[in-house]
Image (cartoon, rainbow, N blue to C red):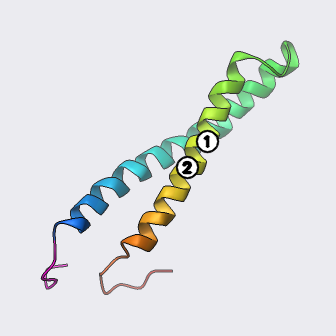
Amino acid sequence: MGNDPESGGPSAVWSAAAAVVLTVRVVAVIATPILVFAWLVAAVRSGLLNGWMWWAVGAALALLISSYLYSYLRVRYPSRSERWEP
């Protein structure tokens, strides 16, 4: 971090991208089960193809895409800190 001569540049962009991706991922993790449950309740009352389905699908897609992007960013720009990471 402080001893790296190439600090800044790509690592700053990676940090900003990771912050956005992680924020989307946290919101999607919270929203997906809530929206899927709301969709299932509405499906029992009216049918499977209801308005809640698209919100549930969108949240699940956001979770899938953000998980992929975060894993891609972790491989492309690994941490240079001295701490242990799994």
Could you tell me residue 50's position as x and y percent? 75, 17
Could you tell me residue 60's position as x and y percent? 64, 41
With 3 as the anchor, is 80 left or right in this view? right
Q: Quadrant of residue 42?
A: top right
With 33 as the anchor, is 6 left or right in this view? left
Q: Quadrant of residue 30?
A: top right
Residue pictured at 54% horizontal, 58% vertical: 68
- Tell me, yes or no, whether the highlighted magenta stretch contains residue 49: no
Residue pictured at 55% horizontal, 49% vertical: 65
Could you tell me residue 7's position as x and y percent? 16, 74
Q: Disc 1 versus disc 2: distance between alpha carbons?
A: 6 Å
Quadrant holding the N terminus: bottom left
Residue 61 image label: 1
Q: What amino acid type should be assigned to the residue bearing mark 1? A: Leu
In contact (CB < 8 Å): disc 1 and disc 2: yes
Considering the numbered disc 2 on the image, is that residue within a helix, a strand or a loop?
helix
Using a 10 Å C-alpha cutoff, classify the residue at mark 2 as few (fewer than 14 neighbours), some (14 to 19) or many (20 or more): some
Q: Which residues are magenta?
A: 1-7
- Label 2: which residue? 65
Could you tell me residue 62's position as x and y percent? 55, 42
Q: Main secondary structure of the magenta part?
A: loop
Q: What amino acid type should be assigned to the residue bearing mark 2? A: Ile
Up-down relation of residue 57 to residue 63 (above or below): above
Using a 10 Å C-alpha cutoff, classify the residue at mark 1 as few (fewer than 14 neighbours), some (14 to 19) or many (20 or more): some
Up-down relation of residue 63 to residue 54 (above or below): below
Residue pictured at 58% horizontal, 47% vertical: 63
Q: Quadrant of residue 73?
A: bottom left
Residue 81 image label: none
